[in-house]
């Protein structure tokens, strides 16, 4: 990563991190910490506050949480319960990670980054949770496992791309934003169609 980043690159990284946190907060924190610990991800001076993620204790907690999420996210309906519990946790975590990316010498920008980062994480979380609710309507469990595995791989790959190529980070953020909105719209339409079909079905006659 270049030592001197422009505002576009910084906003791209912040946007990518916040949106990916809405998918996999703990994996995002763990992957970032491991990359810095093994010097795969050198940070410029004004991003050194992210170095706390390379702390062994922080990586240990993030790793344990990521391990639990890895399995919970692949079990039918348990993933939706897990998402519900994290409706508050992921946006706050994404906002804090975004805050760490912004230069602390500019409090106004940090405040804006905190708000927008939390909002982006909440939006990504909403898209993920909505899509998973639709997938859970399928009677077989394999689609759930497949979707969850794709999310794991995509989060790790996109996070690496965002950090290693600050220019691409902005593109990653825009793609994730569009994807999150599209998932919410599609999921809402599908769930509404299912609800209307169930509502309009005639009630089964009561057996004497």
Image: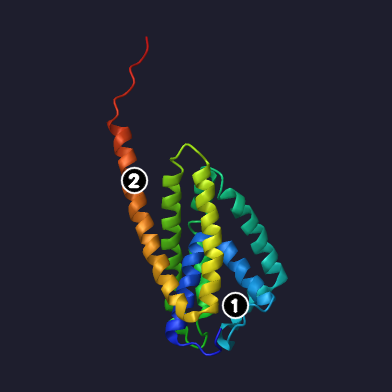
Say which of 144 and 122 sits in front.
144
| 100 up-or-down from 143: above or below | below
Label 1 neighbourhood size at 10 Å, few (<14), some (14-19), many (20+)?
Answer: some
Say which of 159 and 104 sits in front.
159
Residue 78 falls left or right of residue 136:
right
Label 2 neighbourhood size at 10 Å, few (<14), some (14-19), many (20+)?
Answer: some
Q: Residue at x 60, y 54 (%)?
A: 70
| 163 up-or-down from 90: above or below | below
Residue under label 1, please give it: 50
Residue farthest along the top direction in this orientation: 208
Residue under label 2, please give it: 190
- Upstream in the sequence, badge 2 or badge 1? 1
Give the x, y percent position of residue 140. Answer: 50, 38
Mark 2, mark 1: which one is toward the viewer? 2
Q: Secondary structure at mark 2?
A: helix
| 66 up-or-down from 18: above or below | above
**Which numbered marker is on residue 153?**
none
Give the x, y percent position of residue 58. Answer: 67, 68
Q: Residue at x 44, y 79 (%)?
A: 11
Residue 188 falls left or right of residue 101:
left
What color scheme is it?
rainbow
Give the x, y percent position of residue 142. Answer: 53, 43
Q: Residue at x 67, y 79 (%)?
A: 39
Res 153 quadrant in image: bottom right
Say which of 148 and 17 sits in front.
148
């Amino acid at each position: 990563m270049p030592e001197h980043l422009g505002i576009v690159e910084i906003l791209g990284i912040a946007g990518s991190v916040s949106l990916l946190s809405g998918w996999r907060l703990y994996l995002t924190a763990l992957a970032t910490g491991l990359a810095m610990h093994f010097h795969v991800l050198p940070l410029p001076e004004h991003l050194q506050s992210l170095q706390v993620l390379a702390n062994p204790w922080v990586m240990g907690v993030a790793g344990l949480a990521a391990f639990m999420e890895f399995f919970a996210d692949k079990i039918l309906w348990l993933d939706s319960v897990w998402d519900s519990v994290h409706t508050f946790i992921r946006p706050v975590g994404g906002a804090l990670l975004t805050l760490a990316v912004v230069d602390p010498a500019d409090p106004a920008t940090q405040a804006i980054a905190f708000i927008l980062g939390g909002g982006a994480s909440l939006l990504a979380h909403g898209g993920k949770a909505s899509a998973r609710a639709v997938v859970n309507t399928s009677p077989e469990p394999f689609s759930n496992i497949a979707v969850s595995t794709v999310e794991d791989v995509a989060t790790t790959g996109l996070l690496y791309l965002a950090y290693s190529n600050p220019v691409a980070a902005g593109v990653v953020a825009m793609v994730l934003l569009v994807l999150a909105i599209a998932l919410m719209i599609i999921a809402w339409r599908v769930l509404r169609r299912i609800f209307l079909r169930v509502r309009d079905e005639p009630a089964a006659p009561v057996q004497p």
